[in-house]
Structures are given as structure tokens and as C-alpha cells.
């Protein structure tokens, strides 16, 4: 038997709201390498399909979700119907609902106005880093300030990247294949998710369907996302021996 | 591009996205997400991300069918290997782009 580990790790000292806010902003810095180029790509693609400056920047301010922005931009560029674009973007952003549900129990004491406003800048990085912080034993109030500082910093970097992309997008030569950064950015997001075979199955089915025959109304991504999730869920049900387990 | 079309997409997409974000933090603050839905939601991101990556790696050709583009495929495989090993954003993006440019220069 191994020596039992101490069950109650000492909680880190509580930070003042200001220090927690700054700690959150500081935690955004390593994310710059993903956030800025991705913002540039989103801004540049919005510009390239013929959106005006105001439209391209509004997309970035109001939606504030790179993957959905890229997808919506590609679909607008190919003239897909509005409902297909919005539904596809909604499904691409369904993960925010999962993040919202995962964070909610930790922010029960946060005032309602804080939760409603704080939900707006919720993205992959702010979710993952804040949840990691909570797992370290930080208290609710401090985690809320940390989340705010992190979210504001990520938001500002995103808008800067978008602005650069909208303004400079057409200067970058096409033979640099800078669009490939989109694929690389999503590889960075995808790989840590592949923790079990069902996640691999969801990814595999999603990839296969996205490469399959072109569906009418540009429905490929929507169908790929739903098919991947449905097949993974189904196989999980079939292969998990006990229905009450896990 | 048609102004009404673009603004409709921007407005509706921003509302749909905010709905997801505020769902359990605000709207349904005291409701637990049902387990089946939790599992389903967990499987959406890998499916979405893979479905965005795949057409970039196998760009569609003239017939709308995916084509084999060696520089993109090799760069993507290298990036996946680096991401699996390092989990580093910087290393993954840099190695992927350098591999793509290197392969394109070799095959040009």
C-alpha cells in the first residue's frame, strides 16, 4: 500500500478581488498564441467574403466565438440559408451550454447580474482555466474575479486580432496558406478532448461525415456534429455493461 | 453581400450563442442538466472540431469531393503528433505551419 496522500490539501491563501482579477488577466497571456492568430483569421475571412468593416467587427463583438464565426463566414460566403447558418453556429457553440452547466454550481453565490453579464464572454479558455482554478481549491468569490479578469483580457486580445485581420487580411499573400492555422487551432482544441474511445469515435464520425458527399443547403457540418455525437452516445450506451454505472 | 442577410445572421447567431452561454449560469440556474444531455453535449465538441479540421486537410476538388493534398496531410499529421505529445499551442501551430511551408517548397 502506498502512503496515503493528505486528503485535504491546504487551500491557497485568498486573494483580494484586484489581485484575483490581475491573476486572471495574467493567465490569458499563454493563450495569446492561439487567440491572436485565430482572431486575425476570423477577421480576414469575414473581410474576404465581402462583409463591411462594421459587419465584420460586429460579428466579432456580438458572437465572440471563433469557431462559429469561421463557420458562419464560410456558410455566408457560399450563400447558405440564414436558418442553416444560425443552427450550425448554434450547434458549434453547444459546448458553451456544457461549460455553463459545469460552472453554474461554482457561481451560485455570484449575484444574478454578474452571472448574466459574465456569461457573455464565456469561451473555451476562460472555462478551462477557471475550472482548473476552482479545482485548486480557490473560493467562489475569488474564482469569479479570476474569471472576469481572464475573460476581459481574452476578449480584448480577440478584438485586437479581429481588427488586425479585418484591416490587414488582404495583405497576407494567398500562397502563405495562412488559412491552415484554422485547422491547426482546432487540432490544439481537439487533441486534449480525446480522453476515451467515445471521444475518438465522435471525432472520427464527424470527420468522415464532413468529407462525405456535399449535402444540400450546406448542412454538412451540422449533420457531422450531430452524427458524431449521436454515434458516440449510442455506442457508449451499447458498450457500457451496467446502465447505472459511471 | 446583402446587408439584411448579413445582419440577420450576426444578430441571430449572437443571440443563439448567448443563449447557450447563459443557459445554466442564468436562465436555468437551479436546474441540473440531465445525464443523457450531458453525455451528448460532451460528444459535440470533438465531432465539431474534427468536422472543421477534415475539410481543411482534404480540400474539396472540382467535383466537390475531398482531394489528397500531401503537404496539408503531412503537416496536419505532424501537428497532431506534436499536440498529442506536448499539448502546446505554440509548438503545434508553429510546427504545422513550418511543415506545410517546407512540404510546399519541396513539392513546388
Image: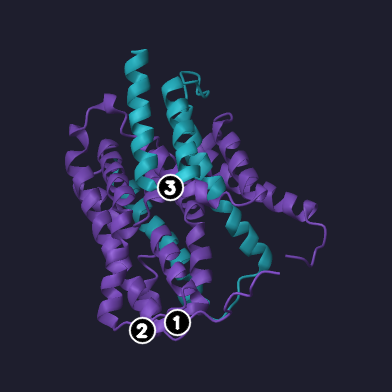
Chain colours: A purple, B cyan
Task: Tell which circle, 1 or 3, labels the residue nearer the N-terminal end.
Answer: 1
Q: Pointers 2 and 3 in contact (CB under 8 A)?
A: no
Rate crowding at label 1 as few (under 14), some (14 to 19) or many (20 or more) other CA atoms within 10 Å. Answer: few
Which element type, helix, strand or loop, lies under badge 3? helix
The quarter in which the C terminus of chain A is drawn is bottom right
Which element type, helix, strand or loop, lies under badge 2? loop
- Residue A178 in view (yes/no): yes
For the residues labelled 2 and 3, the Cα–Cα distance comes to 48 Å
Q: Residue at x 46, y 43 (%)?
A: B83
Q: Which residue is mark 3?
A: A82
Residue B6: horizontal and vertical position, in percent?
32, 47
Residue A226: horizontal and vertical position, in percent?
60, 48
Q: Residue furthest right?
A: A241
Q: Is residue B64 above or below residue A82?
A: above
The circle drawn on residue A14 is 2
Q: Residue at x 32, y 82 (%)?
A: A15
Please report, as a chain letter, where disc 1 is located. A
Task: Using the rendered image, report if marks 2 and 1 lie on a common chain.
Answer: yes
Q: Residue at x 37, y 27 (%)?
A: B100
- Residue B37 is left or right of residue A244, and the answer is left
Rate crowding at label 3 as few (under 14), some (14 to 19) or many (20 or more) other CA atoms within 10 Å. Answer: some
Q: Which residue is mark 1?
A: A11
Amino acid at each position: 500500500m502506498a502512503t496515503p496522500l493528505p486528503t485535504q490539501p491546504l487551500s491557497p491563501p485568498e486573494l483580494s478581488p484586484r489581485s484575483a482579477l490581475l491573476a486572471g488577466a495574467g493567465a490569458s497571456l499563454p493563450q495569446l498564441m492561439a487567440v491572436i492568430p485565430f482572431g486575425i483569421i476570423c477577421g480576414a475571412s469575414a473581410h474576404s467574403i465581402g462583409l463591411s468593416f462594421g459587419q465584420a467587427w460586429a460579428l466579432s463583438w456580438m458572437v465572440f466565438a471563433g469557431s462559429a464565426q469561421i463557420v458562419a463566414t464560410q456558410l455566408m460566403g457560399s450563400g447558405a440559408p440564414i436558418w442553416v447558418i444560425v443552427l450550425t453556429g448554434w450547434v458549434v457553440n453547444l459546448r458553451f451550454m456544457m461549460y455553463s452547466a459545469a460552472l453554474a454550481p461554482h457561481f451560485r453565490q455570484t449575484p444574478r447580474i454578474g452571472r448574466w453579464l459574465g456569461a457573455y464572454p464565456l469561451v473555451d479558455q476562460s472555462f478551462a482555466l477557471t475550472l482548473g482554478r476552482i479545482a485548486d481549491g480557490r473560493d467562489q468569490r475569488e474564482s469569479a474575479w479570476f474569471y472576469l479578469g481572464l475573460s476581459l483580457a481574452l476578449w480584448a486580445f480577440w478584438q485586437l486580432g479581429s481588427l488586425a485581420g479585418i484591416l490587414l487580411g488582404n495583405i497576407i499573400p494567398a500562397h502563405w496558406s495562412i488559412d491552415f492555422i484554422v485547422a491547426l487551432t482546432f487540432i490544439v482544441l481537439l487533441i486534449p478532448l480525446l480522453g476515451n474511445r467515445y471521444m475518438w469515435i465522435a471525432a472520427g464520425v464527424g470527420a468522415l461525415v464532413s468529407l462525405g458527399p456535399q449535402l444540400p443547403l450546406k448542412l454538412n457540418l451540422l449533420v457531422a456534429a450531430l452524427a458524431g455525437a449521436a454515434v458516440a452516445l449510442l455506442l457508449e450506451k451499447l458498450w457500457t455493461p451496467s446502465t447505472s454505472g459511471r | 453581400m446583402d446587408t439584411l442577410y448579413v445582419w440577420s445572421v450576426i444578430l441571430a447567431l449572437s443571440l443563439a450563442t448567448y443563449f447557450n452561454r447563459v443557459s445554466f449560469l442564468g436562465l436555468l440556474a437551479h436546474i441540473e442538466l440531465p445525464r443523457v444531455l450531458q453525455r451528448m453535449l460532451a460528444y459535440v465538441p470533438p465531432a465539431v472540431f474534427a468536422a472543421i479540421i477534415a475539410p481543411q486537410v482534404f480540400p474539396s476538388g472540382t467535383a466537390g469531393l475531398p482531394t489528397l493534398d500531401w503537404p496539408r496531410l503531412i503537416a496536419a499529421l505532424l501537428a497532431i503528433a506534436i499536440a498529442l505529445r506536448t499539448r502546446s499551442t505554440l509548438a503545434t501551430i508553429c510546427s504545422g505551419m513550418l511543415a506545410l511551408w517546407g512540404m510546399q517548397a519541396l513539392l513546388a
